[in-house]
Image: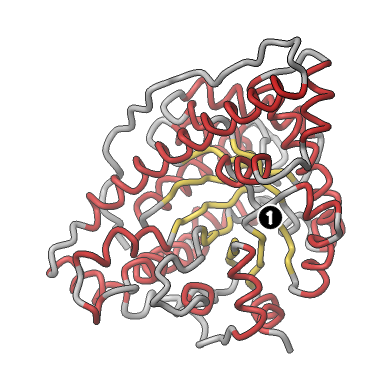
Amino acid sequence: MKSTRQLHDLGQSLWLDNITRTLLDDGTLARYIVDYSVTGLTSNPSIFDAAIGGGDAYDAAIHAKTQAGLAGEALFSELALEDLRRAADLFRPVFDATDQTDGWVSMEISPLLAADTAGSIAAARRIHDQAQRANLFVKIPGTPQGLPAIEEAIFLGIPINVTLLFSCAHYQAAAEAYLRGIERRLAAGLDLRVGSVASLFISRWDVAGNPQLLTELQHKLGIAVARQTYRAYRELLASSRWQKLASAGARPQRLLWASTGTKDPSAPDTLYVSALAAPDTIDTIPEKTLHAFADHGRLQGVMPADGGDAEAVLSQIASAGVDVQALAAKLQQDGALSFVKSWQQLLQRIAEKSGALAPDRAPSTARQHPIDLPAGNAPCQI
């Protein structure tokens, strides 16, 4: 049995952390579904920037949409949703067979809205309405300003992928926003079946922390944070608060591992995928890592529901001089700024292609908005 199938059978969903028009056109994504048990995918501005800039697959569509009068964010949204609708349709059988638990795709709101609650809500509604697919998540960052937008979107019945979470405390804040949204729907007599996932980023912890740590503690920080968060996740699902909502028909907000490709060439290329095997979770895997795990990946047991050695490892890392709480806030801030940069590059690339393909039209350029994010949430209490 393939290792990817083993993960699927233990209750973990494998989602591709990539989308390109070529993957759809040449049947590669369809093959991943059959061969590697892939049951969903995620996208972000960096992924679309690479996809659109990596060749001419989008040129005809950019030309047609430019001629139709679209530019900037509106043109990009149409391009992205064309791909995501096709992907959502490929995953629709999984979505239906799992009673809407699996088989999702994701589309991110503009990263320029990371500090704009009202703008995030409006963008989420617009993408949800425009997508016209039941199995499409709208991604909203779990920043302090994003949390009320997440609550309101859930209340409005918009499926949400909470992105840019880096710590157990970040996860708990996202879970609280989801619970409040569902509880408001319960009070209003609305359908409680609103999908959501909470995306915790893993490998960036070790990229930031390794330079400050001795060899024996390197590549352990991200996994320890994941284990600590998994414990909080299991405890929430066992809580009376959640059980009340579940008995009324609500669905769990699933915990999703993001950024699971190994960025250090000295570390095993399947390090995080093996370590993050856990029931009732999702692992979004970069394409290169998916191939590596299918080829030579091995399971190393299942993540302990009680967090295992997470607290001991985090204590050692703190003693070595790494302020985990401060680093979580910095990683979230840096992640938001990185997506802004990719977004601006993406819109500039589209504008340049629009101008080259239709020189009689003046291309639109990306708007410049500063991002001002407050400090992160309080330390995780579990």
Q: Is residue 99 above or below residue 65?
A: below
Displayed quadrant of residue 373: top left
Locate the C terminus by quadrant.
bottom left
- Drawn side of residue 41 relative to residue 303, left or right: right
Residue type at numbered disc 1? Leu
Q: Is residue 244 above or below residue 302?
A: above
- Drawn side of residue 379 relative to residue 162, left or right: left
Q: How many labels does the image show?
A: 1
- Drawn side of residue 85 relative to residue 328, left or right: right
Residue positioned 36% across, 55% down in the render: 167
Residue positioned 38% across, 74% down in the render: 307
Observer-nearest of 306 and 139: 139
- Drawn side of residue 284 relative to residue 305, left or right: right
Q: Residue 374 at what x, y percent from top left?
A: 29, 33
Residue positioned 62% across, 15% down in the render: 364
Label 1 residue SS: strand
The colour scheme applied to this rendered structure is secondary structure
Observer-nearest of 5 and 360: 360
Q: Residue 265 at what x, y percent from top left?
A: 42, 72
Observer-nearest of 378 and 315: 315
Q: Residue 189 at what x, y percent from top left?
A: 69, 34
Q: Residue 282 at what x, y percent from top left?
A: 60, 64
Mark 1 lies on residue:
41
Q: In this view, does 225 lie above or below 171?
A: below
Observer-nearest of 47 and 100: 47
Locate the N terminus by quadrant.
bottom right
Near mark 1 (Cα within 10 A), the count class, few <14, some 14-19 or many ≥20, is: many
